[in-house]
């Protein structure tokens, strides 16, 4: 007879997996952040949301989480894997270069934020002990969500990304003394306090030393041995063993599992297995982090919104504003630019996951009442849910505070115009190849680009490229469009291509316009608005791939090239016909004009 199973655990796991498999794809389809999707699903389907109505509506049992503890352990592993990945992306040498921000800016942010928040908490009638705990816990930010948001937008390497990570690392290191502080406050005996503190510090030191020593001696040989078996399953098992083992070792000594995993990641970052391990554990990290965000959402008590909505709103706004203003000011003192300082401040202004650990411990020790704990954790959860929106606001707001720079003199050089030349719009990778081929065939041209950072560098390297906006008729006239033979559009943005084509065609109905296109659909659109030839990237790539494959298969080079050219012409005719053009329309009557040497 089969052993009985805990239906509650499995039903809760199914709800979380269903969120990951059904809800999140829908959220992505509508352009929303997956983090917000998990947070919202946790708030709605958690014990404080629809889960609180199970007694009235028993069917809700199968679509809600009954007990948050059933998925809490899995959620913690998500943060562990995230910190391991972060450690893999760093190294001890890089940490040394970041020490000014970690121990300088990060430490000051924690101290000042905790002091201000604690002072405000005391003004609302909280005892000194409660105020200190609330200030310390709310001073920290969400490592998991902030790093995930920065990673999704490719901003981890930006100034704001590096600064945010440095401050978050300082906060992670501060978790240990903060937990000790809460434990000391909850203790009743002075002797037991000192004993507990002494043992905790010794255990912490020994745990970190053990992880580092074992990692230095055994990690590289272990992965070399596993890699020699050429077994993907064994490699996955070894990676999971190292991550969870380091986390358990740290947790046994009273540290956080995430810190132990971070140290293991640092050690493996210096090995040749770094990229392989990152690829192996990527799917685990994504799913487990989703579970973590789901559990954070479960702590949002919707009933608090109805109980004290004004106080809750003021607390959410106040926490974000206080921490953001303090961190922005400190970042400016550490000589960060206004855009980086503002983005860092807004990202780290909300509360973090440690508040659930620290305040939960204080509540279990009887230091904080259940009502204060519930209200504070709801405020923290809401601020964490706002991080993706704050990140978007920071990216849009920060550039307005960008400090003006002296105009590079290379940007003021005006195009000389000309006669019988080509105008190449865009001097990126595609534009540079086009200009090289025009040079090789002796065709005169004038290249323009609107990248204020790239143009001066390219001009100093000897390229004849001018800064300007080719969507402006006045600039096109300066480039000699009225005397030019052709305009070649190489930029990637579809909107920019459309505008350039419209402006050029409005000035000259007889000029050759050759444009880059994304695909066949875009090419048909360009033919309709007046290009002479459109070159779809997808079709051109398939033709070149076919050419290389046929020659590699032994077909005659001349025959293959002729066949490819014939197929290219067929594609062109099909696209033009699909665009509704005929041979006597202007777009086609100029198609066979060529550029000749002067």
Image (tube, rainbow, N blue to C red):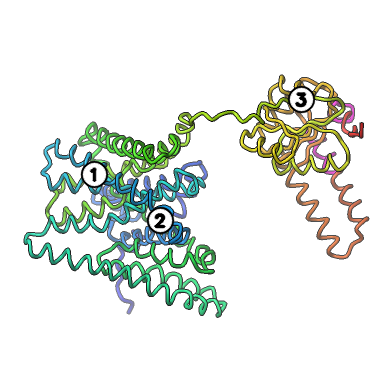
- Does residue 360 appear to the left or right of 21 in the view shown? left
Residue numbers of the magenta segment: 570-588
Q: CA distance from mark 1 to mark 3?
A: 59 Å
Q: Foreground residue, 527 or 194?
A: 194
Q: CA distance from mark 3 to mark 2?
A: 53 Å
Q: Which residue is mark 2?
A: 289
The verdict on residue 440 being magenta is: no
**Mark 3 or mark 2, which has the lower sequence index?**
2
* SS for dot 1: helix
Residue at mark 1:
114
**What is the CA distance from the residue labelled 1 to the residue labelled 2?**
27 Å
Category of crowding for the residue at label 3, using alpha-carbon neighbours closer than 10 angstroms: few (below 14), some (14–19), many (at least 20): many
**Residue 390 in the figure: left or right of residue 446:** left
Q: Quadrant of the N terminus?
A: bottom left
Tag of residue 479: 3
SS assignment for the magenta stretch, majority: helix
Name the front one of labels 1 and 2: 1
Q: Is residue 307 left or right of residue 590?
A: left
Q: Residue 248, percent across and down?
A: 32, 69
Q: Is residue 577 magenta?
A: yes
Q: Give the class, few, some or many, for how many residues have Cα within 10 Å of label 1's Cα (few <14, many ≥20).
A: many
User: Does 231 appear above or below 49?
Assistant: below
**Mark 1 vs 3, N-terminal side:** 1
Q: Is residue 351 above or below residue 259?
A: above
Whether residue 351 is situated above or below residue 194 in the rendered picture: above
């Amino acid at each position: 007879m089969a052993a009985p199973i805990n239906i509650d655990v499995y039903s809760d796991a199914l709800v979380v997996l269903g969120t990951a498999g059904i809800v999140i794809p829908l959220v992505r389809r509508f352009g929303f952040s997956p983090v917000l999707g998990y947070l919202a699903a946790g708030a709605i389907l958690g014990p404080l949301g629809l889960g609180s109505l199970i007694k009235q509506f028993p069917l809700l049992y199968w679509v809600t989480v009954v007990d948050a503890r059933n998925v809490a352990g899995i959620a913690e592993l998500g943060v562990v894997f995230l910190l391991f990945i972060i450690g893999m992306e760093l190294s001890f040498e890089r940490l040394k270069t970041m020490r000014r921000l970690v121990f300088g800016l990060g430490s000051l942010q924690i101290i000042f934020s905790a002091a201000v928040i604690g002072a405000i908490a005391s003004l609302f009638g909280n005892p000194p002990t409660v105020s200190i705990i609330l200030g310390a816990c709310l001073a920290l930010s969400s490592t998991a969500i902030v790093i995930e948001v920065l990673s999704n937008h490719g901003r981890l390497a930006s100034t704001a990304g590096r600064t945010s990570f440095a401050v978050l690392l300082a906060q992670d290191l501060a978790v240990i003394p903060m937990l000790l502080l809460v434990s000391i406050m909850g203790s009743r005996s002075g002797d037991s306090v000192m004993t507990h503190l002494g043992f905790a510090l010794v255990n912490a030191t020994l745990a970190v030393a053990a992880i580092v020593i074992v990692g230095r001696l055994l990690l590289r040989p272990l992965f070399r041995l596993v890699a020699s078996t050429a077994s993907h399953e064994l490699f996955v098992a070894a990676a999971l063993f190292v991550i969870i083992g380091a986390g358990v070792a740290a947790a046994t000594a009273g540290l956080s599992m995430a810190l132990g995993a971070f140290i293991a990641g640092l050690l493996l970052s210096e090995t040749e297995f770094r990229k392989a391990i990152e690829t192996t554990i990527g799917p685990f990290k994504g799913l487990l982090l989703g579970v973590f965000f789901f559990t954070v959402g479960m702590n949002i008590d919707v009933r608090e919104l109805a109980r004290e909505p004004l106080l809750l709103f003021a607390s959410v706004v106040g926490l974000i504003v206080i921490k953001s203003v303090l961190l922005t000011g400190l970042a400016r003192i550490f000589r960060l630019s206004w855009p980086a300082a503002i983005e860092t401040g807004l990202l780290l202004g909300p509360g973090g996951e440690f508040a659930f650990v620290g305040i939960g411990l204080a509540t279990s020790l009887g230091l904080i009442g259940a009502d204060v704990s519930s209200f504070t954790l709801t405020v923290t959860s809401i601020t964490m849910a706002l991080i993706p929106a704050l990140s978007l606001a920071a990216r849009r707001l920060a550039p307005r505070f960008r400090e003006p720079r002296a105009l590079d003199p290379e940007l003021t050089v005006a195009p000389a115009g000309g006669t019988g030349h080509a105008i190449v719009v865009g001097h990126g990778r595609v534009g540079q190849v086009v200009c090289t081929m025009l040079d090789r065939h002796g065709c005169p041209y004038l290249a323009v680009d609107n990248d204020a950072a790239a143009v001066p560098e390219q001009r100093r390297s000897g390229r004849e490229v001018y800064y300007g906006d080719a969507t402006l008729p006045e600039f096109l006239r300066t480039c000699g469009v009225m005397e030019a033979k052709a305009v070649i559009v190489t930029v990637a943005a579809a909107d920019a291509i459309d505008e350039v084509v419209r402006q050029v065609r409005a000035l000259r109905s007889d000029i050759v316009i050759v444009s880059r296109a994304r695909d066949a659909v875009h090419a048909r659109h360009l033919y309709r608005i007046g290009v002479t030839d459109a070159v779809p990237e997808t079709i051109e790539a398939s033709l070149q791939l076919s050419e290389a494959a046929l020659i590699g298969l032994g077909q005659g080079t001349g025959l293959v090239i002729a066949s490819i050219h014939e197929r290219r012409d067929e594609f062109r005719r099909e696209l033009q016909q699909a665009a509704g053009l005929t041979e006597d329309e202007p777009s086609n009557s100029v198609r066979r004009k060529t550029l000749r040497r002067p």
